[in-house]
Image (spheres, rainbow, N blue to C red):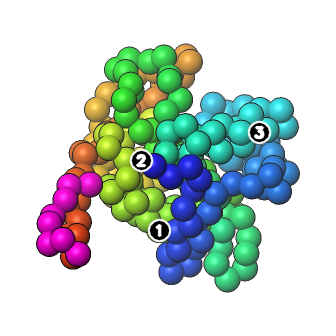
Amino acid sequence: MPKSAPQIETSRLILRGHVIDDFNTIADLWADPEMVRFIGGVPSSREASWTRLLRYVGHWQLMGFGYWVIIHKDSGQFVGEIGFADFQREMQPSMDNKAEMGWVLSPKFHGKGYASEAAMAVLDWADTHIPRQVCCIINPENGPSIRLAEKNGFTLQAETSYQGAKVRLFTRPVVVKLTANIADGENRLC
Protein backbone atom coordinates (compact mmCIF):
# COMPACT_ATOMS: atom_id res chain seq x y z
CA MET A 1 0.00 0.00 0.00
CA PRO A 2 1.55 3.35 -1.04
CA LYS A 3 2.32 5.70 1.86
CA SER A 4 2.73 8.67 -0.46
CA ALA A 5 1.40 9.62 -3.88
CA PRO A 6 3.25 7.97 -6.73
CA GLN A 7 4.23 10.34 -9.53
CA ILE A 8 2.20 9.90 -12.71
CA GLU A 9 3.06 11.53 -16.02
CA THR A 10 0.80 12.12 -18.98
CA SER A 11 1.62 13.81 -22.26
CA ARG A 12 1.10 17.30 -20.78
CA LEU A 13 0.93 16.84 -17.02
CA ILE A 14 2.83 15.65 -13.98
CA LEU A 15 0.76 14.40 -11.06
CA ARG A 16 2.66 14.32 -7.78
CA GLY A 17 2.03 14.26 -4.08
CA HIS A 18 1.41 17.40 -2.07
CA VAL A 19 4.28 19.09 -0.25
CA ILE A 20 4.23 21.87 2.31
CA ASP A 21 5.43 24.37 -0.30
CA ASP A 22 2.06 23.89 -2.09
CA PHE A 23 0.16 25.49 0.77
CA ASN A 24 -0.02 29.10 -0.45
CA THR A 25 -1.05 28.00 -3.95
CA ILE A 26 -3.74 25.71 -2.52
CA ALA A 27 -4.98 28.46 -0.21
CA ASP A 28 -5.23 30.88 -3.16
CA LEU A 29 -7.00 28.28 -5.33
CA TRP A 30 -9.60 27.41 -2.70
CA ALA A 31 -10.17 31.10 -1.85
CA ASP A 32 -11.19 31.82 -5.47
CA PRO A 33 -15.01 32.28 -5.62
CA GLU A 34 -15.08 31.07 -9.24
CA MET A 35 -13.27 27.84 -8.36
CA VAL A 36 -15.61 26.95 -5.48
CA ARG A 37 -18.80 28.00 -7.28
CA PHE A 38 -19.98 24.37 -7.57
CA ILE A 39 -18.19 23.09 -4.45
CA GLY A 40 -20.22 24.60 -1.66
CA GLY A 41 -19.98 28.11 -3.12
CA VAL A 42 -18.02 29.52 -0.19
CA PRO A 43 -14.31 30.34 -0.55
CA SER A 44 -12.09 28.54 1.95
CA SER A 45 -10.12 30.28 4.68
CA ARG A 46 -6.38 29.65 4.96
CA GLU A 47 -7.16 27.51 8.01
CA ALA A 48 -9.53 25.30 5.99
CA SER A 49 -6.96 25.01 3.19
CA TRP A 50 -4.29 23.99 5.70
CA THR A 51 -6.60 21.24 7.02
CA ARG A 52 -7.27 20.16 3.42
CA LEU A 53 -3.54 19.85 2.72
CA LEU A 54 -3.03 17.73 5.84
CA ARG A 55 -6.03 15.57 4.92
CA TYR A 56 -4.56 14.93 1.46
CA VAL A 57 -1.26 13.72 2.90
CA GLY A 58 -3.03 11.75 5.63
CA HIS A 59 -5.11 9.81 3.14
CA TRP A 60 -1.97 8.38 1.55
CA GLN A 61 -0.56 7.47 4.96
CA LEU A 62 -3.70 5.75 6.27
CA MET A 63 -5.64 4.63 3.20
CA GLY A 64 -3.00 4.01 0.51
CA PHE A 65 -4.75 6.44 -1.84
CA GLY A 66 -5.34 10.16 -1.91
CA TYR A 67 -4.95 13.32 -3.96
CA TRP A 68 -2.30 14.52 -6.39
CA VAL A 69 -1.22 18.00 -7.40
CA ILE A 70 -1.61 18.53 -11.16
CA ILE A 71 1.37 20.36 -12.68
CA HIS A 72 1.63 21.54 -16.29
CA LYS A 73 4.68 19.69 -17.60
CA ASP A 74 6.06 22.45 -19.87
CA SER A 75 5.45 25.51 -17.70
CA GLY A 76 5.62 24.00 -14.21
CA GLN A 77 2.38 25.81 -13.30
CA PHE A 78 0.02 24.44 -10.66
CA VAL A 79 -3.09 23.38 -12.61
CA GLY A 80 -5.17 21.88 -9.79
CA GLU A 81 -5.76 18.75 -7.74
CA ILE A 82 -7.27 15.33 -8.39
CA GLY A 83 -7.59 12.09 -6.52
CA PHE A 84 -9.52 9.81 -4.20
CA ALA A 85 -10.65 10.07 -0.60
CA ASP A 86 -12.77 8.51 2.10
CA PHE A 87 -14.32 11.54 3.78
CA GLN A 88 -16.86 9.56 5.85
CA ARG A 89 -19.63 11.75 4.50
CA GLU A 90 -22.95 11.47 6.28
CA MET A 91 -25.33 11.21 3.35
CA GLN A 92 -27.76 8.83 1.71
CA PRO A 93 -27.19 6.73 -0.20
CA SER A 94 -24.09 5.93 1.76
CA MET A 95 -20.64 6.16 0.22
CA ASP A 96 -19.16 3.83 2.85
CA ASN A 97 -16.42 1.57 1.51
CA LYS A 98 -16.16 3.56 -1.70
CA ALA A 99 -13.29 5.76 -2.87
CA GLU A 100 -14.68 9.21 -3.63
CA MET A 101 -13.00 10.82 -6.61
CA GLY A 102 -12.71 14.58 -6.83
CA TRP A 103 -10.98 17.18 -8.99
CA VAL A 104 -10.48 20.92 -9.02
CA LEU A 105 -8.69 23.03 -11.59
CA SER A 106 -7.73 26.64 -11.48
CA PRO A 107 -10.26 28.49 -13.67
CA LYS A 108 -7.47 29.66 -16.00
CA PHE A 109 -6.94 26.01 -17.00
CA HIS A 110 -10.58 25.16 -17.72
CA GLY A 111 -11.56 23.97 -21.19
CA LYS A 112 -8.11 22.70 -22.20
CA GLY A 113 -8.67 18.97 -21.57
CA TYR A 114 -6.38 18.83 -18.53
CA ALA A 115 -9.08 17.46 -16.21
CA SER A 116 -9.86 14.68 -18.66
CA GLU A 117 -6.17 13.81 -19.11
CA ALA A 118 -5.56 13.72 -15.36
CA ALA A 119 -8.78 11.78 -14.65
CA MET A 120 -7.91 9.04 -17.13
CA ALA A 121 -4.44 8.70 -15.59
CA VAL A 122 -5.58 8.45 -11.96
CA LEU A 123 -8.47 6.12 -12.80
CA ASP A 124 -6.01 3.84 -14.60
CA TRP A 125 -3.91 3.88 -11.42
CA ALA A 126 -7.00 3.23 -9.27
CA ASP A 127 -8.01 0.22 -11.36
CA THR A 128 -4.94 -1.64 -10.11
CA HIS A 129 -4.50 -0.08 -6.65
CA ILE A 130 -7.89 0.67 -5.06
CA PRO A 131 -10.02 -2.40 -4.27
CA ARG A 132 -13.15 -0.28 -3.81
CA GLN A 133 -15.82 1.09 -6.07
CA VAL A 134 -15.09 4.67 -7.11
CA CYS A 135 -17.81 7.30 -6.79
CA CYS A 136 -18.12 11.07 -6.98
CA ILE A 137 -20.64 13.72 -5.99
CA ILE A 138 -21.29 16.65 -8.31
CA ASN A 139 -23.46 19.73 -8.14
CA PRO A 140 -26.27 19.22 -10.72
CA GLU A 141 -25.43 22.60 -12.32
CA ASN A 142 -21.79 21.64 -12.95
CA GLY A 143 -22.13 20.42 -16.53
CA PRO A 144 -18.39 20.13 -17.28
CA SER A 145 -17.78 17.87 -14.26
CA ILE A 146 -20.82 15.74 -15.05
CA ARG A 147 -19.54 15.28 -18.62
CA LEU A 148 -16.07 14.40 -17.31
CA ALA A 149 -17.52 11.79 -14.94
CA GLU A 150 -19.69 10.24 -17.66
CA LYS A 151 -16.78 10.21 -20.12
CA ASN A 152 -14.83 8.16 -17.57
CA GLY A 153 -17.50 5.51 -17.00
CA PHE A 154 -19.44 6.99 -14.09
CA THR A 155 -23.21 6.63 -14.11
CA LEU A 156 -25.80 8.46 -12.08
CA GLN A 157 -26.80 6.48 -9.00
CA ALA A 158 -28.92 9.03 -7.14
CA GLU A 159 -29.99 12.63 -6.86
CA THR A 160 -29.56 13.49 -3.21
CA SER A 161 -28.24 16.21 -0.93
CA TYR A 162 -25.14 16.80 1.12
CA GLN A 163 -25.08 19.42 3.88
CA GLY A 164 -28.28 20.95 2.52
CA ALA A 165 -27.07 21.26 -1.09
CA LYS A 166 -28.37 19.21 -4.00
CA VAL A 167 -25.80 16.79 -5.42
CA ARG A 168 -25.72 13.91 -7.83
CA LEU A 169 -24.00 10.71 -6.75
CA PHE A 170 -22.20 8.92 -9.57
CA THR A 171 -20.55 5.50 -9.35
CA ARG A 172 -18.14 3.68 -11.62
CA PRO A 173 -18.05 -0.11 -11.97
CA VAL A 174 -15.21 -1.83 -10.17
CA VAL A 175 -12.47 -2.61 -12.66
CA VAL A 176 -10.23 -5.59 -11.97
CA LYS A 177 -7.10 -5.79 -14.06
CA LEU A 178 -5.10 -8.94 -14.56
CA THR A 179 -1.37 -8.61 -14.34
CA ALA A 180 1.00 -11.25 -15.56
CA ASN A 181 3.87 -12.31 -13.35
CA ILE A 182 6.42 -13.25 -15.97
CA ALA A 183 8.87 -14.73 -13.44
CA ASP A 184 6.58 -17.50 -12.20
CA GLY A 185 4.15 -17.64 -15.12
CA GLU A 186 1.07 -16.89 -13.01
CA ASN A 187 -1.72 -14.43 -13.64
CA ARG A 188 -2.86 -12.52 -10.61
CA LEU A 189 -5.87 -10.38 -9.91
CA CYS A 190 -5.08 -6.89 -8.73
**Amino acid type at image mark 1:** Glu
* Label 2 residue SS: helix
Which residue is more in the foreground, 15 or 171? 15
Q: Quadrant of residue 12?
A: bottom right
**Amino acid type at image mark 3:** Ser
CB under 8 Å between discs 1 and 2: no
180 left or right of 157 in image: left
105 left or right of 76 in image: left
Which residue is more in the foreground, 89 or 163? 89
- List x then y, in percent, for residue 39: 61, 36
For discs 1 and 2, the disc positioned in front in the rendered view: 1
Identity of the residue drawn at 49% across and 33% down: 86
Q: Mark 1 = which residue?
A: 117
Residue 146: give its label: 2
Label 1: few (<14), some (14–19) or many (≥20) C-alpha neighbours in 10 Å: some
Which residue is more in the foreground, 160 or 120? 120
Identity of the residue drawn at 36% across and 62% down: 124
Identity of the residue drawn at 50% across and 39% down: 63
Residue farthest along the front direction in this orientation: 184
Magenta-tinted stretch: 183-190
**Amino acid type at image mark 2:** Ile
Q: Which circle's residue, 1 or 3, is located before the other in the chain? A: 3
Q: Quadrant of residue 30?
A: top right
